[in-house]
């Protein structure tokens, strides 16, 4: 298990290293003077000189990369050239908003998705199974930002059940502001997880050990909820890890539509003001988050499954 | 030619037997038809402004109303379908072709090359798609080509991995071993024997990928980072609608419904296609 | 007849399929007395599994009980409520399944599973664990207390089957159904498990319905045998009678084909030529006709009834009638 953990995180680090290098080279590969591009119309000689020194642009490219990594390891993503604040600080200030949104979306969509999937699998080929299957597929297909816009129109503008913009104050205020964005980005996950759990459950329910449990008179609820579901949700854990990446993407839209603070809003605002260090810093952090969550999900999965725990 | 035509007929008949598949077929057919004949269908020039008729509600003259520049929303919706397909089709086919090539190289080539390509795929997949798109747009600026490039780059790994797995499976199958023992060239093995077997699986993947691509194009355009105005994209329509959501809800509905319809239609069609072509794939999703 | 535990009475079971009704069991009749060991023997596909799942009513959704009764202590199980059935399962009737590798839940510890099946007992969890450990010890698993924490994959196949037997016997059932419990194991393990089963049976005095296609094991263990072919009983009776004086050609061929009975070192193991008939489309006459080397014209036209030849020996073959006639 420990071996597996080390290998899995080693791979995560390697991927992250390649990803960051690719991003670094991408910036340098853009034709034109990077300082000019980064500063755009606001370039002044002083700013240009400062940025050139900071990015070590007068050095050969491998030196630049070394300097970049040295800074990165120390948690230094550079300085926002306009405000003079540290990029790390700015990104981490916005990050919690995005993380709460993603957490809320995963929680409600996994809970509902597992419920629907397990119910459908326990009653295969009934009318309800068919209806939930059709609804699930429709949910999967619905793009998050369209759902966000339509729910904004219906629930915030027309019905005025929930606030339209912002992140809210205090616990209940924040929660109230989370409802619509979390609904919008979680909806397709309900369908996705429901389908996954249904397929996985049907497979497990056909396995011999379920027949054994029934042959011992263990009540059907326990057979479904403990004996089968414990195994059937294992793939869901992995999918939720991968889902972090998708949710980080959808969160961008939810933050724009509902004018919420967060990583996505930060990136979009920075693109319009051509604040490249912040764009790159945010993309880097979100990539790291994604890579780590995928690795973590694999580990949790292995830990939950005694067979894998032993094999790895 | 005759054989493949009858196979195609069989596939379509198979899809039409499934109610959701039939629905998908009708929706996708309508969208494709409207996209091809858009120029003849649209009642107004989708980019022509008419300041007198701005922000009108739905009426007989303008079934979906007009936007802040007096452009006919219905015409822009029809034209937007053309734009969506113009992005989705080249992006999906490009990604499929490149993914197929790289995947077959990874599956058939030396081990080190396989490892290298897999690391590359894993790396690309490690970027959250929209974040990666934003980084690229930030660097090279928004345009239709940028969207196509981003979509292609991010979906190559999916095709690549599937093509690799298929190649590895086929590589050790009886009939390929027999071919090899008779001294068939690599080109012959890859081109004649493996390619047709892999393309079928990838085509199903591609069909299921189209809704994702349409949504991504619309999403980027909604953020103002996709196709440039005044090109009528569904996402751009939503962007205008969002700004005026309290005054003119029909803009959001007019831009949102076609996206949902298109993604639903392509999803239904893709799922049905998968069940008809390869029922075994069902378990993998 | 008061000591009769289980009576299968003219039981017919179909599976509804797209090809039409599959006649999996036809007119099955036999009984098991208290404390008796009855063996069922037959090739795969003869309806053994359908019979077991019918007794426990753990049948696939497309199963249809067409006729007959399954009486346990006088109660017809086919008419019992689901609630009543659940009360019987794992209490009065227990089962050991065929494949020990898949019979336990892979993500729950053995201890947890053995506690779970004692769901009817009011004892504390610690007491239930103690009982589980005692039972594991009884089937010959060393260091049982410690191994309760382990998961199924940490045990070998033989161990797992012992655990399955321990679990089945924990409630001290009146009837234990053993569905080819040793088929997946190698020969030495088979002998050990059978011996253990015999010991436990003489201790607990439960009846056993033992399903196998291995005649040697049946001869060793059972008091009586039921020979099944293509969903029907072709012969039944006392073990010694059946083995020494089989009255159905199928039984005779089975005995000839059993590796334990081949005295001379045959180069090729004998097999019964031909295939089991299609259960969805049964031919008229005797079902074994096509594979029988003694078939007569009469066999093609009339189904031979299962008839008593002697006290406790039944067979369904026209040959026995010819003997009487001549």
Image (cartoon, rainbow, N blue to C red):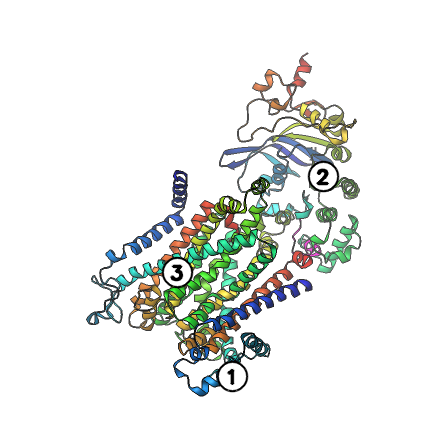
Res. B246 image quadrant:
bottom left
Is any atom of residue B145 visible in this view? yes
Q: Secondary structure at mark 2?
A: strand
Provide residue A99's location: percent of width, then percent of height: 51, 72
Residue found 58% across the figure and 28% down from its top: C277
Is C78 on the left or on the right of B206, as rendered?
A: right
* Marks 2, 3: nearer the viewer: 3
The residue at the point 53 percent across, 40 percent down is C62
x then y, percent, for residue A144: 42, 65
Q: Do badges 3 and 1 share one subunit?
A: no
Callout 2 environment at 10 Å: few (<14), some (14 to 19), or many (20+)? Answer: many
Q: Nearer the viewer, residue C8 or B122?
A: B122
What chain does badge 1 belong to?
A: A
Give the numbered dot on residue A53: 1
Q: Nearer the viewer, residue B144 or B242?
A: B144
Q: Secondary structure at mark 3?
A: helix
Q: With respect to residue A42, does B127 lie above or below?
A: above
Report the label total. Answer: 3
Q: Is residue C47 magenta?
A: no
- Secondary structure, mark 1, is helix
A22 horizontally vs C207: left or right:
left
Q: Quadrant of residue C288?
A: top right
The mark found on residue B214 in the picture is 3
What x and y, as percent, mark residue C133? 76, 54
Chain for disc number 3: B
Indicate which label's residue lies in the foreground, 2 or 1: 1
Q: CA distance from mark 2 to mark 3?
A: 64 Å
Q: Residue furthest top?
A: C326
Q: Which residues are magenta?
A: C103-115
The label number, if any, that marks residue C208 in the structure image: 2
Q: Do callouts 2 and 1 mark residues in contact (Cβ within 8 Å)?
A: no
Q: Residues within 10 Å of mark 1 (few under 14, many from 20)?
A: few
């Amino acid at each position: 298990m420990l071996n597996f953990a080390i290998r899995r995180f080693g791979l995560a680090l390697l991927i992250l290293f390649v990803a960051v290098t690719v991003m670094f080279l991408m910036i340098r590969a853009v034709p034109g003077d990077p300082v000019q591009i980064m500063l755009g119309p606001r370039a002044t000689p002083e700013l240009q000189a400062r940025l050139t020194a900071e990015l070590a642009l007068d050095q050969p490219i491998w030196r630049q990369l070394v300097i970049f990594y040295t800074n990165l390891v120390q948690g230094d993503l550079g300085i926002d050239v306009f405000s003079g604040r540290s990029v790390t600080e700015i990104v981490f200030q916005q990050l919690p908003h995005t993380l709460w949104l993603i957490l809320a979306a995963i929680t409600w969509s996994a809970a509902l998705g597992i419920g629907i999937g397990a119910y459908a699998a326990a009653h295969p080929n009934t009318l309800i199974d068919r209806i939930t299957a059709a609804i699930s597929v429709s949910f999967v297909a619905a793009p998050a930002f369209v759902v966000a816009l339509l729910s904004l129109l219906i629930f915030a503008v027309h019905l005025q059940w929930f606030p339209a913009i912002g992140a809210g104050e205090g616990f209940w205020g924040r929660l109230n502001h989370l409802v619509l964005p979390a609904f919008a980005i979680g909806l397709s996950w309900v369908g996705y997880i429901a389908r996954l759990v249904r397929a996985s459950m049907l497979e497990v329910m056909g396995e011999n050990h379920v027949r054994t449990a029934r042959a011992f008179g263990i009540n059907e609820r326990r057979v479904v909820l403990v004996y089968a579901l414990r195994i059937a949700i294992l793939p869901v854990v992995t999918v939720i890890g991968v889902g972090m990446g998708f949710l980080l993407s959808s969160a961008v839209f939810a933050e724009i539509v509902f004018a919420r603070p967060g990583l996505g809003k930060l990136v979009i605002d920075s693109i319009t003001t051509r604040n490249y260090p912040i764009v790159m810093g945010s993309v880097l952090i979100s990539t790291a988050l994604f890579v780590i969550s995928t690795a973590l999900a694999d580990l949790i999965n292995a830990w939950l499954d005694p067979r894998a725990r032993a094999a790895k | 030619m005759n054989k493949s035509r009858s196979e195609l007929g069989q596939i379509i008949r198979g899809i039409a037997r499934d109610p959701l598949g039939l629905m998908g077929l009708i929706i996708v057919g309508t969208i494709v038809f409207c996209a091809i004949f858009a120029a003849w269908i649209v009642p107004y020039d989708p980019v022509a402004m008419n300041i007198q008729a701005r922000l009108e509600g739905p009426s007989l003259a303008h079934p979906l109303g007009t936007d802040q520049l007096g452009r006919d929303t219905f015409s822009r919706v029809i034209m937007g379908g053309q734009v969506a397909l113009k992005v989705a089709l080249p992006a999906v086919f490009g990604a499929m072709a490149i993914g197929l090539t790289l995947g077959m190289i990874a599956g058939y080539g030396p081990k080190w090359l396989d490892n290298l390509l897999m690391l590359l795929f894993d790396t690309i997949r490690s970027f959250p798609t929209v974040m990666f798109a934003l980084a690229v747009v930030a660097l090279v600026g928004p345009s239709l080509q940028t969207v196509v490039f981003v979509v292609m780059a991010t979906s190559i790994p999916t095709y690549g991995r599937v093509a690799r797995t298929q190649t590895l499976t086929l590589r050790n199958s009886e009939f390929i071993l027999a071919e090899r023992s008779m001294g068939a060239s690599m080109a012959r093995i890859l081109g004649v024997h493996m390619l047709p077997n892999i393309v079928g699986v990838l085509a199903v993947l591609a069909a299921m990928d189209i809704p994702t691509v349409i949504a991504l194009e619309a999403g980027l355009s909604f953020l103002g980072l996709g196709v440039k105005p005044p090109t009528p994209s569904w996402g751009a329509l939503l962007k205008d609608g969002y700004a005026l959501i309290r005054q003119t809800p029909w803009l959001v509905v007019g831009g949102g419904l076609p996206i949902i319809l298109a993604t639903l239609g392509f999803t239904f069609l893709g799922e049905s296609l998968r069940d008809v072509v390869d029922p075994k794939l069902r378990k993998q999703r | 007849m008061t000591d009769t535990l289980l009576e299968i009475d003219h039981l017919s079971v179909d599976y509804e399929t797209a090809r039409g009704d599959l006649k999996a069991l036809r007119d099955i009749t036999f009984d098991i007395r208290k404390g008796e060991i009855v063996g069922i023997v037959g090739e795969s596909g003869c309806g053994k599994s359908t019979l077991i799942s019918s007794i426990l009513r753990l049948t696939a959704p497309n199963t249809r009980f067409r006729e007959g009764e399954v009486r346990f202590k006088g109660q017809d199980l086919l008419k019992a409520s689901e609630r009543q059935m659940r009360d019987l399962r794992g209490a009065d009737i227990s089962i050991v399944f065929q494949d020990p590798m898949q019979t336990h839940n892979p993500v729950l510890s053995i201890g947890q599973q053995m506690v779970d099946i004692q769901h009817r007992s009011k004892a504390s969890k610690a007491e239930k664990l103690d009982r589980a450990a005692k039972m594991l010890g009884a089937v010959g698993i060393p260091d049982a207390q410690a191994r309760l924490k382990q998961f199924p994959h940490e045990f070998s196949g033989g161990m797992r089957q012992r655990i399955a037997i321990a679990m089945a016997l924990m409630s001290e059932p009146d009837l234990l159904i053993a569905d080819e419990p040793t088929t997946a194991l190698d020969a030495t393990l088979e002998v050990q498990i059978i011996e253990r089963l015999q010991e436990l049976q003489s201790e607990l005095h439960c009846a056993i319905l033992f399903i196998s296609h291995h005649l040697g094991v049946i001869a060793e263990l059972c008091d009586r045998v039921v020979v099944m072919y293509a969903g029907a009983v072709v012969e039944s009776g006392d073990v010694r009678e059946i083995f020494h004086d089989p009255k159905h050609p199928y039984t005779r061929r089975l005995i000839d084909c059993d590796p334990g009975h081949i005295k001379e070192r045959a180069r090729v193991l004998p097999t019964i030529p031909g295939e089991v008939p299609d259960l969805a489309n049964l031919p008229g006459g005797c079902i074994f006709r096509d594979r029988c080397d003694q078939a007569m014209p009469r066999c093609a036209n009339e189904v031979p009834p299962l008839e008593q030849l002697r006290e406790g020996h039944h067979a369904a073959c026209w040959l026995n009638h010819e003997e009487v006639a001549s």
